[in-house]
Image (cartoon, rainbow, N blue to C red):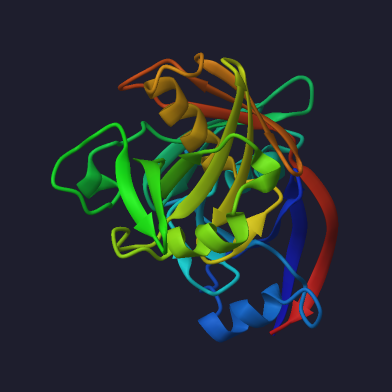
Amino acid sequence: MQLPFTKMHGLGNDFVVVRANGTPPPDTATIRALADRRTGIGFDQLLWVDRPHIAGAAGYYRVFNTDGSEAEQCGNGARCIAALLGAGSARALVLQHRGGTSRARLELNGQVSVEIAVPQFEPAKVPFIAGQEAESYKVRVGRRNLELRVVSMGNPHGVVRVNDIDAAPVATVGPALESHERFPNRANIGFMQVLDPEHVRLRVYERGVGETRACGTGACAAAVVGRRAGWLADRVVVALPGGELIVRWEGPGSPVWLTGEAVTVFEGTVAI
């Protein structure tokens, strides 16, 4: 079977986007093979875009990580899908996904904004195992006792504040927290350095992928827990290894908006 695809990225967080037209997604082994950067196409996530299930939506998408697992949401991926489906037509559209729907806008400056979710801090909704909701939690990883903040952005996140992002133990603590027993569905783990109330630096160890150049929902999670803690403003520039994202959150009960670039790299066809 010949499968047409579009290779896209948001700040180096890269995707293979497939317009499925009713075709079911590949099995786990095939997704892993396609994700291999030496013998496949290479990507952080496979975005499988199909016809929407509801009127008024531009498309319904599913997100698959490099290990073949399915994710609930992907912020940079949603922005790339919006750019692809909205190109040459509407500047505002609605995208459908596992968690419901999200609004998206193609900005006049070429960037793309997408509505991610209303943040959920209740442990059961992350999910995260805790006796009761708290602003932060003490979690032991090896010999370290860490202060961890958790939130669902439609997918599970943990955020650790660090003094120096360059020295953050992303490669060791990241995978340990991603699969920690208190995250029953695993989690994306962000390491955040606060520069001032409107600027942070961030590195993210993504669930099922590893450290990526950028993580859209991870940027949202960092901005949200930072504002909840009183460190950050309602508009935050998040600097990731691949570039900058803008996160806006008006506060409890409001959805988070994510803005940044969405770039088409090339079109191709692959045999599966």
* 122 w.r.t. 98: above or below: above
Closer-to-camera residue (112/37): 37
- The outermost residue toward the left is 131
Q: Quadrant of the N terminus?
A: bottom right
- Residue 66 picture location, percent across and down: 60, 70
In this rendered view, identify the residue nearer to me: 259 or 126. 126
Q: Is residue 71 left or right of residue 21?
A: left
Q: List the single residue furthest toward the right.
A: 266
Give the quadrant of residue 235: top right
Q: Is residue 182 left or right of residue 3?
A: left
Q: Position of residue 38 (x, y in %)?
A: 81, 79
In the image, what residue occupies the spot 74% across and 65% down? 5
What residue is rendered at 65% in x and 63% in y?
Answer: 18
Label tally: 0
Residue 55 makes an appearance in the image: no
In this view of the protein, which residue sits in the foreground, 192 or 85?
192
For residue 177, side relative to residue 246 (left or right): left
Q: x, y (%) of residue 74?
A: 54, 49
* Quadrant assignment for the C terminus: bottom right
Please, which residue is most extreme toward the front here?
Answer: 143
Q: Compared to 108, does 148 lie above or below?
A: below
| Residue 183 seen in render | yes
Query: Toward which corner of the image does residue 117 lie, by quadrant?
Result: top left
Compared with 150, 19 (above or below) is: below
Residue 31 horizontal/vertical position (percent): 60, 77
Q: Residue at x 76, y 53 (%)?
A: 8
